[in-house]
Image: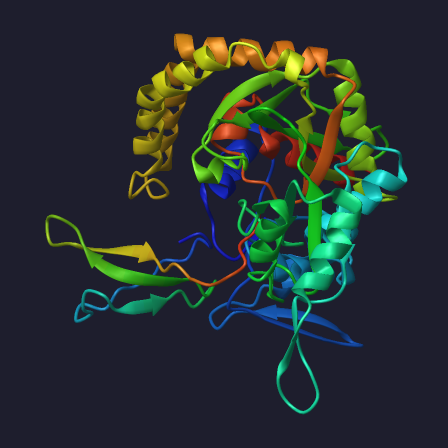
Amino acid sequence: MDCGANLDVPNDSLQGEIIGCPDCGLDFVIEMDESGNKQLRELLIEGEDWGE
Amino acid sequence: MLYDRSETDELGIRLTAEEMGVELDYFPFHKVAVGFDADGFSYRSLGRDYSDRLRDTRVILNRTQSKSRRLFAADVFEAMGAHVLNPLTVELACKSKVRTLLAFSSKGIRVPRTVYVPANVEEQVGGGGAQDNSGTISRLISQDLGSEKVVVKPDAGTHGRGVTLAEGPDGLLRVLRDVAPTIINPSGVVAQELVPKWFYDLRIVVRKEKGKAPYCHETALARGGFKEFRTNTFLGNKVFRAHLPAPVRRQAENSAQALGGDEDSWVIALDAMPRIGDELMEGEESLRQSFEDLEEPFSEVTRVKRMPDKKRNFPEYNREITRAYAEYMASEPYAHIQGVVNETLEKCRDSVYFHEGNACPEFWEQTRLVGGVNVAEDLLTCALGLIDS
């Protein structure tokens, strides 16, 4: 994680579930890679006035 | 470094800090609680208390992506007693195009002629219904700028969003009817003369270290194309390295200083455009051909930038994007267009118009690799200057 924390992904978590890092608050979406392993993708937030 | 979410710029800042031997910590600025009262501050997420780490922090690099959130971040951390890059006054100056242009013009810096009308195009009236002010606003703008070609833009927009070219009185009315109060244009209408910049504008980086005069880099990013009048690279325009003539660098330093005010240290990316007369617009046909010929080398750049896991595999992404840009910059069409940019810029050295300041610019790919300016080095150098003092 960006904050240096280790995020535990529960064994029974499902693809598409959103989990948050308790240390920094960033949210991640659980995805499956080609080998069927779980990986995390940062959740994109829409509708913000992003910076320059 | 403080951010709500990281992009390649923030990863690049981390990498540059490692290379420079600078100790860089990270603070989240999204799902955290900033508590304060007369007895002090606290800074907590659900899983961690950052309050003690804050007390040991001297300088905050504010890379919060959301503009409004970034203002809060600057406010909060300055209140806590930290130096913030960029300071709140710089963020506020850069946030509003009108405020930026007023700061420039009050210091004698060339800016496009600009008109601000405080009224909104449609306003709710008592008793229900709405008043249509588009006709009045159109006449107010035209009496100053004419109505042949006028640029209407949101006061606080980015990436070219909402910037529209209106042609003729009817065109201006049509464009105005799409202008409404939003987060990127809180009130009124901003209109500007269309500066004949031909096919490119400039992204120029200026930094100020504490105790030193502002410094403008010798090279800049030229962004352009013939597809449309907006030159933001977000819109798919091509980029080139421009060598800035000394008068342009001096104007850039004065412009950035106008935004920096009395602040000790800042890093500002300026947008500027040369006013290029018809007599200099030679060889456009061959230029257009070169832009077409650039599509292939640039498509490789675009392909690499779309790597799905580029943040997770940042070292590999870095290698690939450096390679792709190097091949792009080594191509003949690139050399041709770059030559025209530098030649015209030299001839227009005394008629470059500054129009925007950016307090948190995107930079890792194009400004760094093509423009030759690593903004991360500027930020970290300025931060060290604040700590050492």
Q: Residue furthest left?
A: A35
Residue at 68% from the left image edge and 62% from the top image edge: B135
Q: Residue furthest bottom?
A: B127
Q: In this view of the protein, which residue sits in the foreground, B242 or B321?
A: B242
In-image side of B301 versus B201 (left or right): left
Q: In this view of the protein, which residue sits in the foreground, B37 or B273?
A: B273
Q: In this view of the protein, which residue sits in the foreground, B76 or A49?
A: A49
- The answer to whether residue B84 is seen in the rendering is no
Colour scheme: rainbow
Percent x, y of residue A24: 48, 62
- Judge whether B215 appears above or below B123 on screen: above
- Judge whether B273 appears above or below B41 on screen: above
Quarter of the image that includes the C terminus of chain B: top right
Res B180 quadrant in image? bottom right
Percent x, y of residue B112: 74, 37
In-image side of B346 versus B373 (left or right): right
In-image side of B9 versus B108 (left or right): left
Res B73 quadrant in image? bottom right
- Judge whether B27 appears above or below B119 on screen: above
Q: How many tags in the picture? A: 0
Residue at 73% from the left image edge and 33% from the top image edge: B354
- Judge whether B155 appears above or below B389 on screen: below
- The answer to whether residue B325 is seen in the rendering is yes
Residue at 61% from the left image edge and 12% from the top image edge: B342
In-image side of B330 versus B378 (left or right): left
Percent x, y of residue A37: 15, 54
Residue at 36% from the left image edge and 24% from the top image edge: B298
Percent x, y of residue B261: 86, 43
